[in-house]
Image (spheres, helix red, strand yellow):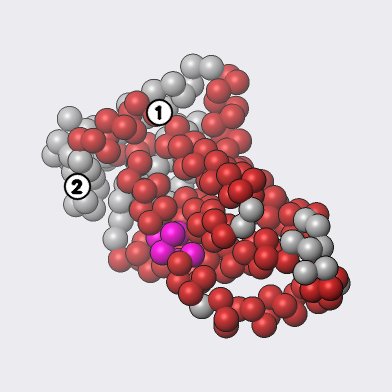
Amino acid sequence: MLQSVGATKLTNWELPGGLQLNPLDRGIFLWLNAPAGHNRSLDALGVFFGQYGIFAFAALMVVLWFALPRRASNDRRHLAYGAVAAAVGELANYVIASLTYRARPFVAMPHLVHVLVHHSADSSFPSDHATAVFAVAVAMSGTSAPLRWVFWTFAVVIGIARVFIGVHWPTDILAGLVIGAGSAVLTLRAHRLLDRPIGWLLRLFRLETEARSRA
């Protein structure tokens, strides 16, 4: 039985706002969140990836844009595609969140959740973090294998960490993956519209001419 939130009495799998939580979602959440609060090192890793991992993810993209070899223009273009895809996904999330509300785990089950960070009680569905990182990961699937593995691993860890620290349900992360992947596919299909401004950026940072001459 879920705990009550304020004066609202909830049915077995009902969240504030009337959205239903299936038993599998609840069970996976409790399994991933259960270790939280028992080991300082594990908690620190969870908080880093769950709370600050998105900033490290973005910083990695910026560093790679400048640090990749000049001949790696395809990888740079996919970094730009990923950034656009993440923005498209976040716009979709804004629309979805404005139409519905899903209580976060620490709101719906305050006595069962180990919450490791301070977070507002806004709607948890879908996960903005997951949408952004998976949008980039899917966009980077067209690059070299090492880059693909780095971004996919980073994205999966961030998604799991968001559940571990107690701020998202597993299906919030799954929805973020689906929305992020959809945004990336749409962005890649529209790459011809993006190639000109991306080429301008490459030339602005003195990367385009050399990249072409070495192709």
Q: Nearer the viewer, residue 214 or 59?
A: 214
> Is 46 colored magenta in this rendering?
no
Magenta stretch bounds: 179-184
Residue farthest toward the front in the current orientation of the protein: 215
- The chief SS type of the magenta part is helix
Residue 174 visible within the image: yes
Residue 69 x/y as whole percent? 81, 57
Quadrant the N terminus occupies = top left
Q: Secondary structure at mark 1?
A: helix
Q: What's the residue type where badge 1 is placed?
A: Asn
Which quadrant holds residue 84? bottom right
Numbered badge on residue 178: none
Location of mark 1 (residue): 33
Q: Nearer the viewer, residue 81 or 166?
A: 81
Residue 54 visible within the image: no
Numbered badge on residue 20: 2
